[in-house]
Amino acid sequence: MANRKYKLLVVDDDDLILESIHMSLPEGWDMLGVQRKQDIPKGEFFHAAFVDMHLTGDITKPEGLKVVKYLSQAQSNLEIVAISGDLDRDLMESCLVAGASRFLAKPLSTEEIRLILEKIEVLFMLNDATLRANCTKTDPWIGSSKISQMIKRNIGELAAENGPILIEGESGTGKEVVAKLLHQGRPSTPFITVNVASIPESLFESEVFGHVKGSFTGADQNKMGLAEAANGGDLFLDEIEALPTNLQAKLLRFLEDGEIRRVGAKDTLKVNVRVIAATNRNLEKMVQEEKFREDLMWRLNGKKIFIPPLRQRKDDIEELSQYFLEKERPRRNKRLSAEALEKLKAYDWPGNIRELKRVFEHLCFSSPLPILRAEDVAKILNLNEQHPEPIRLDVKSGLHKLLSSHEKQIIEMALADRPDIDDVAKTLQISRSSLYKKISDYNIEVRR
């Protein structure tokens, strides 16, 4: 996984333990082993530290607690792992209070050491991606609030884990970003995305599990399914709540035994796939309504990440805003005023991060000044009208006339903000030629 070097500090008085940990290191890790607190080099940066609780062998004196506290104060972002053969509950809780992020029981296995260090790699990768957003292939998780730190830690914990993972959150909160970041813990493996809601029920089994030639009308050749294409990697099932109940049993069977059967085939095929599912619905409520299988829900949510809506983590709005402004450079060099930021924070963002992104795309092309002002934000979000009058429509005029009238108003508003045909066409998500035709049909005057 590592393209960079990571440094591990191990504080333990047992030479055999030091050698054992050194031999278990994953690729990309260097280790410094010391036996006393006094031997820890001052000012040197480490990514992780393993600290034995009983450095003199006296089980009644957990000297390692002092080392943990010293290290946590010396380097705030250091991931400290306390290790001991003494599983006294008070001792373990004292380690967490002192600054350790986790407690491992001796003897440590090679697999356990590797798994912990891989999780720490992912956590540092996520934090680095936040600081160097434009340098990452995958969109980073932006934000330093307590909630965002918790989400990044959850991603780091689950990135190297096997078995299904469920991501819960409202639409637009960043569930696909989380899924891709989870996949970064498995480099050089496939990542296949399936939007469950977009696949017709009659085609779902064929799309996901594949089919053999002649199995149904139009099946003129064998086809590999998306689950098979994801072999060795991750299969991301977005909007899992949209899966029809008759297909949920097939997905459950696949999750249980890892076997797929192409439509029309006699034999099954074993694949090694981790399923990451995402939903914007409450699956437990759907189970109560008999719209989702209970056994499938329990199979999916053994490992779960919940993403709170943006309105619950407004401390991240400033960093998100700067990130979206950076993505618009160098085409549009805009800055955000303090007053505009306050306007953004005052809004509840029902569309979450997706809505915030669209607002910045609009702000960057429509704002007349290099500085985005509070009035620019208020105009886009309609914050100036506290109690807008309800829209009254003359339905007797017919649907076509009503739609045409509103379409004309929308185009006129877009052109008034910035009379650049290319920009307006892009914002309205129509072609340049279509926009010109509508301008002509509605006799709209374009300001030059």
Image (cartoon, rainbow, N blue to C red):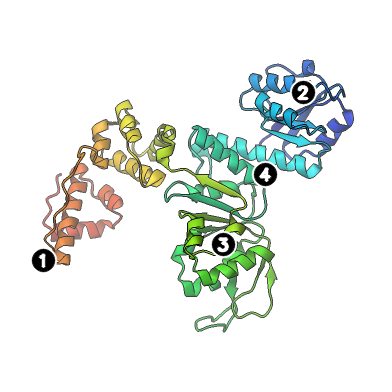
Q: Residue at x 84, y 30 (%)?
A: 18
Type of residue at label 1?
Lys
Mark 4 near mark 1, Cβ–Cβ under 8 Å?
A: no
The residue beneath circle 2 is 64
Q: Percent from the top left, x then y, of residue 305?
A: 55, 47
Which of the two labelled residues, at mark 1 and mark 3, occupies the earlier sequence position? Answer: 3
Mark 1 neighbour density, 10 Å: few (under 14) some (14–19) many (20 or more):
few
Q: Residue at x 62, y 55 (%)?
A: 164
Check the picture and name the quadrant holding the N terminus.
Answer: top right
The residue beneath circle 1 is 396
Q: Percent from the top left, x then y, of residue 435?
A: 22, 57
Q: Residue at x 34, y 31 (%)?
A: 341
Alpha-carbon distance for marks 1 and 3? 48 Å
Query: In front here: 7 or 300?
Result: 300
Q: Percent from the top left, x then y, of residue 245?
A: 51, 69
Q: Residue at x 51, y 54 (%)?
A: 278
Which of the two labelled residues, at mark 2 and mark 1, occupies the earlier sequence position? Answer: 2
Q: Nearer the viewer, mark 4 or mark 2?
A: 2
The residue beneath circle 4 is 1
Side (left or right) of 318 relative to 371: right
Q: Percent from the top left, x then y, of residue 314?
A: 41, 35
Residue 119 in sight from this viewpoint:
yes
Which of the two labelled residues, at mark 2 and mark 3, occupies the earlier sequence position? Answer: 2
Label 4 SS: loop
User: Where is residue 378, by image quadrant?
Assistant: top left
Label 2 SS: helix
Side (left or right) of 290 relative to 73: left
The residue beneath circle 3 is 294
